[in-house]
Amino acid sequence: MPFDEADIAFAKEIQKTLTPETISSSIRLYQIKGDVFANSRVDGATGLHLGLRDFEGQSHFRAGSTDVGDVSWITPTAQCWAPAWAIGTAPHTWQVVAQGKSPAAHKAFAHAAKSLAATGLDLILNPDLLARAKAEWREKTDGKPYQCPIPDHIRPKV
């Protein structure tokens, strides 16, 4: 389901709490160079990214804190980035929390879930594609088994 006028209006209200520098640095951080449908640069004026980020043919390093890195040593993984925040929103801020249960966020999550499910279906229906994904994963992990970076003697306090 596409974003509607209420989604865009809410995103623009969130953007009012951000500086123009924050918005432009966010666009640079996420390396959003353009929109494949609109054939234009993304500048934050729409509040939410309404199109599809142009893919330049290579993945980009994104620093972050998730459990995906640990899981990816055990099994191949996939990620789908969907526009759940107003353009310019910085991670770990009250603006993220304020947008987390918004209708726009739910739409973005549903879109990402459909994309990942369709990818899974492609892998099930195309054994050669699955074999290539597994080979790429083995190459990236270099055949090394997962080793948790937290020493065995470290335990959470109960």
Image (spheres, rainbow, N blue to C red):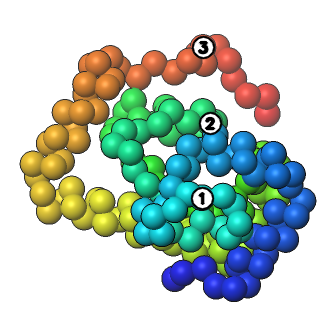
Residue holding disc 1: 42
What x and y, as percent, mark residue 148?
51, 21
Residue at (79%, 70%) from the top-left corner?
Answer: 12
What number is the disc on residue 112? none
**Residue pushed farthest bottom?**
5
Residue at (53%, 49%) from the top-left corner?
Answer: 33
Element on which disc 3 rests = loop
Element on which disc 1 rests = loop
Judged left or right of residue 46, residue 78 is left
The amino acid type of the residue labelled 3 equals Pro
Residue at (31%, 25%) from the top-left corner?
Answer: 140
Task: Measure the alpha-carbon separation of dots 2 and 3.
Answer: 22 Å
Quadrant position of residue 118: bottom left
The amino acid type of the residue labelled 2 equals Gly
Sequence-first tag of 3 and 1: 1
Sequence-first tag of 2 and 3: 2
Query: Is residue 43 or residue 22 the one in the foreground?
Result: 43
Element on which disc 2 rests = loop
Q: Residues within 10 Å of mark 1 (few under 14, many from 20)?
A: many
The amino acid type of the residue labelled 1 equals Val
**Residue pushed farthest right?**
17
Query: Is residue 18 or residue 150 the one in the foreground?
Result: 18
Residue holding disc 3: 151
Task: Measure the alpha-carbon separation of dots 3 and 1.
Answer: 44 Å
Q: Residues within 10 Å of mark 2 (few under 14, many from 20)?
A: few
What x and y, as percent, mark residue 129?
15, 49
Sequence-first tag of 1 and 2: 1
Residue at (71%, 77%) from the top-left corner?
Answer: 8
In which quadrant of the rendered image does the C terminus lie?
top right
Residue 112 visible to the viewer: no
Residue holding disc 2: 64
What x and y, as percent, mark residue 2?
54, 81
